[in-house]
Amino acid sequence: MGLFFKAMLGALVVLLIGVLAKTKNYYIAGLIPLFPTFALIAHYIVATERGVEALRTTIVFGMWAIIPYFVYLLSLWYFTGMMRVWPALGCAVLCWCLSAWLLIFVWSRAH
């Protein structure tokens, strides 16, 4: 039942993004993925399965995880100026993957 609820929550977020993208304030659709829907789920699971100290570590890591998202946005902005949308999205996702890998690598070495 929990997995079904999580899937429905994700589907609702996708629907909300689709609806907002069609409005005159379409740019708000870029704010919706930043609502902590999945973070709430992840934080609840970590807290209940691993305890508060693990949750606090997860929170700090989440603060650093903003960097790969920023890299994604910056690279997508850059790539959309020089290529079509699909290749630009692909390149931006690759930049996110590389920066996320680097973050995980550095984090695991530091902790």
Image (cartoon, helix red, strand yellow):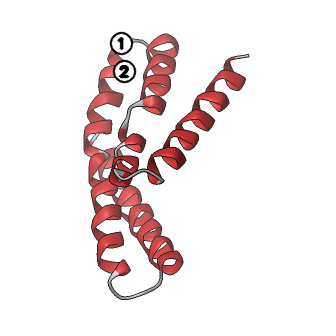
Q: Give the percent coordinates (x, y) of residue 46.
A: 47, 21
Residue at left 41%, top 58%?
Answer: 101
Residue at left 51%, top 73%?
Answer: 90
What is the C-alpha distance between the residues marked 2 and 1? Answer: 5 Å
Q: Which residue is mark 1?
A: 52
Residue 110 quadrant: top left
Q: Residue furthest front?
A: 24
45 w.r.t. 81: above or below? above
Taking 37 as reference, is 64 left or right? Answer: left
Which kind of residue does numbered mark 2 sit on?
Leu
Which kind of residue does numbered mark 1 sit on?
Val
Q: Give the percent coordinates (x, y) of residue 2.
A: 67, 18
Which corner quadrant holds the N terminus? top right
Residue at left 38%, top 34%?
Answer: 35
Residue 9 quadrant: top right
Q: Give the percent coordinates (x, y) of residue 39.
A: 42, 30
Q: Which residue is mark 2?
A: 55
Q: Between residue 93 and residue 84, name the one nearer to us.
A: 84
Label 1: how many residues lie within 10 Å, few (<14), some (14-19) or many (20+)?
Answer: some
100 w.r.t. 86: above or below? above
Q: Secondary structure at mark 2?
A: helix
Residue at left 32%, top 37%?
Answer: 62
Q: Give the percent coordinates (x, y) of residue 44.
A: 47, 17
Q: Secondary structure at mark 1?
A: helix
Which corner quadrant holds the C terminus? top left
Taking 92 as reference, is 8 left or right? Answer: right
Q: Between residue 41 and residue 82, name the one nearer to us.
A: 82
57 w.r.t. 17: above or below? above
Dot 2 and dot 1 residues touching (CB under 8 Å) = yes
